[in-house]
Image (spheres, grey):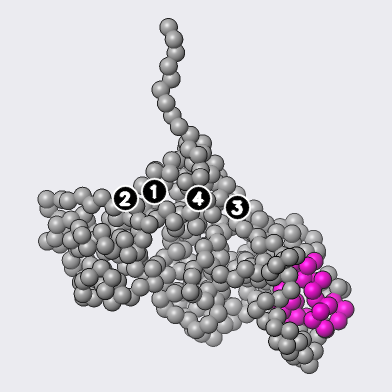
Amino acid sequence: MATNNKILEFPLAAHRNEGRLLIPERLSEGRIAARMTQTELASRVGVSRQSISYYEIGEKSPEPPILRKISEELSLPIGFFTKEDRPMFGRLTANFFRKNGPDTKRRNQACDVFASWLSSFAFAFDKVANFPAVDLPSFEPRGEFYTEEELENAAEETRRAFGLGLGPISNTIRLLESKGIIIARYKIPNEKIEAFSFWSGPRPFIFLASEKESGARARYDACHELGHIVLHRGIGREDIENKETLKKVEDEANRFAGAFLLPRRSFPNEVYSSRVESFVDLKARWKTSIQAMIYRCKDLGIFDDRQVTNAYKQIQYKKWRTNEPLDKGHGALPFEEPILLNKVAKIVIESGVLSKDELVSELELSLEDMEKFCGVSFSEVKEQKTSPEISLK
């Protein structure tokens, strides 16, 4: 629900209309985050599509009752639309989307907005609390793209930099957070997007958006995004608008994720059969999906094309394509949740360094969005109360 919806009336308002001063870009931002077209928003608030267009380019400002309706339909506080500046860590790099299904411009634009909101939310805490320092290796290909050997080496070097051996990683999310990556799990309903990553100034972020409930696949998504963070920081938005380039960088991130989770110097020693049943125990140990392990066997030449094809046929026959063993129910692999923003938010608010009201006032985002970013129900966080001290004479 939108909050803080009191509208102040000014005697002299911008653009010949009375009412609170609207920042046109904020309306576009809020509408895009809600994945609405101008026509859809216009229909909901009872104005023409042209009126919404005029509001967004600054030709007109909505009357107070219309702005209130817009606020309600987009589930954002009135202050969101009038806030001129929302500081964040720095300029955003290109978002790398891990998704399935056809691309939609509306979905990608919404993710860009969520990225800026997440950076602003985390930055509000960064001013009063210390996030872990960013401690990540960085790589560049010798040529236009990475070779397979370069990707394998990058994964091995990242493991060494993180102080890992050659065995399974116990918790990928905690590991990445400890290296300075800010991670949020914010499910975007009805959209076929699993995750995306970006840099905001000097700080890397991973946004986990999948509605899937597979712990193994979520780990892979996080490591795929780690690949983008350490491999592709220098790639611009114009580069990934090229479909061939985008496919190549996605393939690179996939190869990195497989190599990072399943090292070539240890994992092959444990593969003893191409029958998919043999991978259930390996999945329990390596916490990686059976399909990802089979693909890794293909990458490393452990299985030939015939064996890989047969393995995928077995998966299809057993109906494991979207629901493998250990994904759900008794014995399922645990779902790794981010804890960094959660802990920081609780510590800062409970200590009284920053109150909930101050946080809302500074960001002017909806409480629902902020709670999703950090996984905290603010109503359950106890603030430090101040009261006058009284002593007897």
Closer to the chain start, of discs 3 and 1, is 3
The residue that disc 1 covers is 360
Residue 377 is labelled as: 4
Residue occupying the point 81% across, 71% down? 282
Residue 53 in the image, given as x and y percentages of width and height: 24, 73
Q: Quadrant of residue 77?
A: bottom left
Residue occupying the point 41% across, 72% down? 109
The residue that disc 2 covers is 4
Residue 279 in magenta stretch = yes
Q: Residue furthest bottom?
A: 306
In the rendered structure, the answer to whether residue 336 lies left or right of residue 238 reads: right
Element type at mark 4: loop
Residue range of the region highlighted in magenta in the rendering: 271-297
Q: Residue furthest top?
A: 393
Kindly check if marks 1 and 2 are in contact, taking CB atoms under 8 A apart as contact.
Answer: yes
The residue that disc 3 covers is 339
Of circles 3 and 2, which is in front?
Answer: 2
- Neighbour tally class for label 2: few under 14, some 14-19, many 20 plus, Cα within 10 Å: some
Of the 4 image quadrants, the one containing the C terminus is top left
- Neighbour tally class for label 4: few under 14, some 14-19, many 20 plus, Cα within 10 Å: some
Residue 237 in the image, given as x and y percentages of width and height: 46, 74
Closer to the chain start, of discs 3 and 4, is 3
Closer to the chain start, of discs 3 and 2, is 2
Disc 1 versus disc 4: distance between alpha carbons?
14 Å
- Neighbour tally class for label 1: few under 14, some 14-19, many 20 plus, Cα within 10 Å: some
